[in-house]
Image: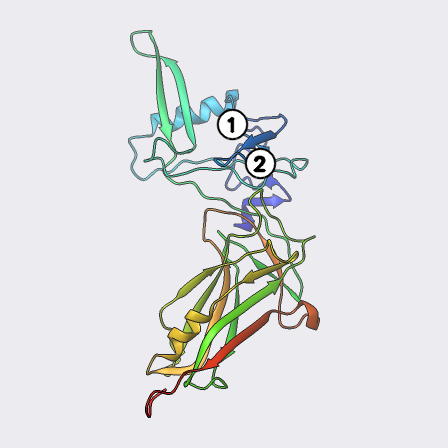
Amino acid sequence: WKDLFSSGVTPNPTYFPNAATPMASYSGSLSYLSDTSGVQIPDTLTDLKLPLTTVGKQVVSSWLQRSHDATAFFGFGLIPTANSKVIQELSTANSQYDSLPYIRIWVYYHNASNLPDSTLIRSSNDVSYVDPDTLAAPLYLVQPVAQHGLRFVVNLDSISLSDAILQAEFSVAYDQTKTRLGNLGSNFIFAYVQPVLKDSSLGLVTSYYGDSTASAGRVVFKNIGPGFDYCRRLSNFSGKAVVTIQQSPLFYPARHAVYGMDADVALRPKLTITTSVRPKIGSQR
């Protein structure tokens, strides 16, 4: 994904041969829009319409002429210029859903009868891509698309099987100056809990949303305890569980610069497990 850019936001001509002359361009101010609950979201637009340049018209015309070729794939990239720091995400959806936003090109032309006509070209696959910054330890990148995540191994052997896990709160700190978030904040980050089995393979995954609203600069997973309890119930459980921190794979391109276990103590990931002794009934707990 990084190779899509020659430097900074300059498109790599290997993938974008017309980068010097864009297919289309847009310049304007972003405003406030309201979401479904009436809350205003800053720096937001509805449909963004970009008239094609002469080069853009030539490119789309060549697509239409080769549209019968099943082996040909065509595409374009929407890239903000260097002064467009507020753009974090362009919303889109699968083209099969007409009521949802998706990328499309309207082509207006004169047909064989010299009458005005039009053709709609829908995008069949939209994805976000990034030009990631290089981070140095103790900061580690967590982002979607070009997937980067963090994995922690938790030893649960010290908790007796006769005890119940009431809650397990897990949190990771991140550097807010090196983290890029859109208008929706940093809540689209997940913790995935998996048991390490006795044959060293990983078992089924349980997932949990992160929440950054209660603590600035730290994503908190309120209770991943049920995932740990599931691990401990397995007959082939090794005593260790893996907690993986990742962004949702495609739809939300936020990027976190997360502190690892080699950071200062106050910035390291934190796990607090609350347990209780199960009541004894007869000879069983």
Number of marks: 2
Crowd class of label 1 (few under 14; some 14 to 19; many from 20; radius 10 Å): few
Residue 280: quarter of image: bottom left
Judged left or right of residue 139, residue 48 is left
Closer to the camera in the image, 122 or 242: 242
Judged left or right of residue 199, residue 165 is right
Above or below, 281 relative to 265: below
Residue 110: quarter of image: top left
Q: Earlier in the sequence, mark 2 or mark 1?
A: 2
Closer to the camera in the image, 123 or 283: 283
- The image shows residue 98 at horizontal and vertical percentages of 34, 31
Closer to the camera in the image, 100 or 116: 100
Above or below, 208 relative to 82: below
Crowd class of label 2 (few under 14; some 14 to 19; many from 20; radius 10 Å): some
Q: Which residue does the numbered mark 1 point to in the structure image?
A: 48
**Residue at screen point 55% across, 29% down:** 22
Residue type at mark 2: give it: Ile
As measured in the structure, the alpha-carbon distance from the residue carrying label 2 to the one carrying label 1 is 16 Å
How does the figure colour the protein chain or chains?
A: rainbow
Q: Which residue does the numbered mark 2 point to in the structure image?
A: 41
Residue type at mark 1: give it: Leu
Closer to the camera in the image, 65 or 136: 136
In the displayed image of the protein, which residue is found farthest to the bottom? 283
Residue 258: quarter of image: bottom right
- The image shows residue 54 at horizontal and vertical percentages of 51, 20
**Residue at screen point 61% across, 56% down:** 214
Quadrant where the C terminus sits is: bottom left
- The image shows residue 137 at horizontal and vertical percentages of 66, 66
- The image shows residue 249 at horizontal and vertical percentages of 45, 53
